[in-house]
Image: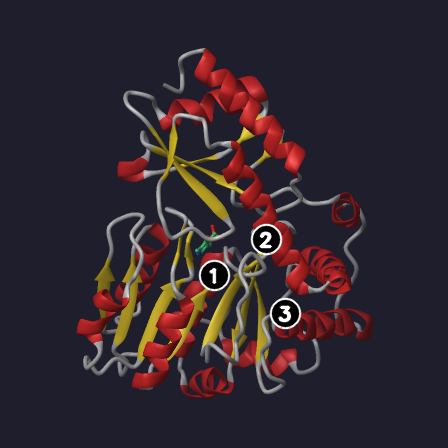
């Protein structure tokens, strides 16, 4: 199968082969050294200062969303959530579960957050701002400069879900004055699912110190404490952390900018090649991670997904909910090449010949 989904994504051979090895015992100085290097490299890739910390949680990306809300926010906060798709909505659900006071900026699917839309919230007395930098469900990349200026101006703690944006976009923790940022293992990091990382500013660490999360597994104070010696409170996804280490070293050897440029070029190449297909890019606020495509007329996006999967051995990403028949998505993260794009485009040209894409 050729995988253009947005996660899990294609891994390269060197990372795959580590997955075939025995998983070592981990309460050792050798494993601690791997963990400390993982933390150092993640912090350097997002230009976080040496006062920042990372915690490594075993769970998919949603685990870090949940841990962030339960450890960084409380009933004393007043949170502003950008709700422009299914991941924005997940933050709303979590605010409800943890009874964190919130308001939403609701955006139509595919719509950007503009200065005009943000303006009415300027004097709302918000203490925290929650955004999925890339709302992966519709492919919208929000304007981090705009958001971080707004938060800095109003003294708002900024929590960025960068799960699908990390490595695909350049993110500067210091410049964007990010309070905390979430990363997942199976997106552009291109290791197996099962790990989720939270980057914590000093302010975020203060919030953790004050928090009383009603959770043992997602107690970030414990994770931070054990992390000082390169350990975790509970058995982590040891094998994935070792794969992560190899992958981070690989990125470090070419430089994080080069990795981001590679993903951007992969996206550009694809977008250029689909110009003559009967498909419309669903949003104008595109990032590098994914291209959301709207089918025309009576064509079915769901059929495109199933036929590419069943007859061509290609995975693209279907959409859910109201967009299920209209939109599918093509990812540009993971170990993909321009010739992989050619294979997908020629399969889609075939669908046009067969009248499936009209
Ligand atoms: C993938 C993703 C998540 C996490 O989803 P999981 O299935 O829990 O890994 C969260 N936010 C965004 C923006 C994502 O793309």
Residue 188: image tag = 2
Lower sequence index among marks 2 and 3: 3
Residue 210 found in image quarter: bottom left
Image quadrant in which the N terminus is located? top right
- Ranked by sequence position, the earlier of labels 1 and 3 is 3
- Relative image position of residue 220 (x, y in whole percent): 51, 76
State the image coordinates of residue 41 (x, y, percent, origin top left): 69, 71
Residue under the point 34% across and 24% down: 300
State whether label 1 is within 8 Å of ligand 1.
yes
Query: Residue at left 63%, top 49%?
Result: 192
| Residue annotated with mark 3 | 45
Q: Residue at x 32, y 51 (%)?
A: 85
Real-space Cα distance between discs 2 and 3? 13 Å
| 128 left or right of 58 in image | left
- The answer to which of 141 and 93 lies nearer the viewer is 141
Residue 170 screen position, x and y as percent:
55, 65
Image height of 281 relative to 132, above or below = above
In front: 105, or 277?
277
Q: What is the C-alpha distance between the residues marked 1 and 2?
A: 18 Å
Label 1 and label 3: CA atoms lie apart by 22 Å
């Amino acid at each position: 199968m050729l995988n253009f989904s947005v996660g899990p994504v294609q891994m390269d051979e060197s990372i795959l082969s580590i997955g075939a090895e025995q998983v070592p015992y981990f309460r050792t100085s050798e494993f601690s050294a791997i963990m400390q290097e993982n933390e150092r490299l993640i912090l350097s890739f997002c230009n976080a200062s040496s006062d920042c910390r990372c915690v490594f949680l075993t769970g998919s990306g949603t685990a870090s969303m949940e841990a962030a809300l339960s450890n960084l926010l409380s009933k004393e906060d007043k949170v502003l959530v950008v709700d422009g798709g299914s991941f924005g909505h997940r933050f709303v659900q979590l605010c409800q579960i943890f009874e964190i006071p919130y308001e939403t900026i609701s955006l139509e699917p595919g719509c950007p957050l503009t200065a005009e839309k943000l303006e009415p919230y300027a004097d709302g007395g918000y203490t925290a701002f929650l955004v999925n930098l890339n709302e992966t469900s519709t492919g919208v990349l929000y304007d981090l400069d705009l958001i971080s200026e707004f938060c800095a101006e109003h003294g708002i703690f900024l929590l960025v879900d960068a799960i699908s944006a990390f490595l695909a976009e350049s993110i500067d923790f210091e410049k964007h004055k990010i309070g905390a940022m979430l990363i997942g293992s199976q997106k552009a990091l291109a290791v197996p699912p099962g790990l989720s990382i939270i980057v914590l500013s000093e302010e975020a660490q203060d919030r953790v110190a004050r928090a009383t999360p009603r959770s043992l597994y997602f107690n970030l104070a414990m994770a931070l404490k054990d992390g000082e010696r390169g350990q975790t409170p509970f058995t982590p996804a040891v094998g994935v952390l070792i794969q992560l280490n190899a992958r981070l070293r690989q990125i470090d050897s070419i430089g994080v900018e080069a990795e981001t440029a590679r993903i951007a070029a992969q996206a550009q190449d694809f977008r250029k090649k689909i110009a003559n297909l009967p498909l419309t890019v669903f949003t104008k606020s595109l990032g590098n991670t994914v291209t959301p495509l709207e089918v025309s007329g009576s064509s079915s996006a769901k059929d495109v997904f199933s036929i590419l999967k069943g007859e061509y051995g290609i995975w693209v990403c279907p959409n859910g909910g109201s967009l299920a028949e209209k939109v599918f998505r093509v990812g540009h993260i993971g170990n993909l090449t321009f010739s992989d794009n050619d294979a997908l485009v020629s399969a889609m040209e075939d669908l046009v010949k067969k009248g499936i894409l009209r």
